[in-house]
Image (tube, rainbow, N blue to C red):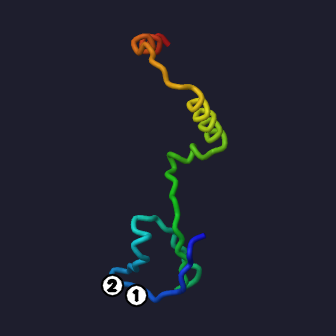
Amino acid sequence: MATVSSPSVKVVGANGQISLGKQFAGRQVLVEEKEPGVWLVRTATVLPDNENWLHQPAAAAALQKSLAWAQNNAPRDSNVAAVIKKMKRG
């Protein structure tokens, strides 16, 4: 479990920013204003809309099945020209 520090005083700069520390550099955060002057700041991972389908149960299950297959089936050489010819046919 992460260590939680005690409250500290931060000054909001002229540009409206505060520094949370270098350990959070580059991280995305959610900022919620609970009431005037009270904010809750939480680190977050934002999921792009076009990748959301990967986290749906059916897609996640298919991905897990594919990964399991790949772990149990070693890659092998194939006749690339024959594969391309077959793909062009249909």
- Give the image location of residue 80, x and y in percent: 41, 15
Is residue 74 positioned above or below 68 on the image?
A: above
Which residue is more in the foreground, 44 or 25? 25
Looking at the image, residue 23 lies above or below residue 76: below
**3D distance between C-alphas at marks 2 and 1:** 9 Å
Seen at 44% across and 70% down, the residue is 24
- Left or right of 65 on screen, residue 15: left
Say above or below: 88 vs 62. Answer: above
Q: Amino acid at mark 2?
A: Ala
> Which residue has dot 2 on it?
14
Residue named by callout 1: 11
Quadrant in the rendering for residue 72 = top right
Give left or right: position of 73 versus 25: right
Residue drawn at (45%, 16%) of the image:
78
Q: Secondary structure at mark 1?
A: loop
Q: Residue at x 45, y 18 (%)?
A: 77
Dot 1 alpha-carbon crowd within 10 angstroms: few under 14, some 14 to 19, many 20 or more: few
**Kind of residue at disc 1:** Val
* Mark toward the viewer: 2 or 1: 1
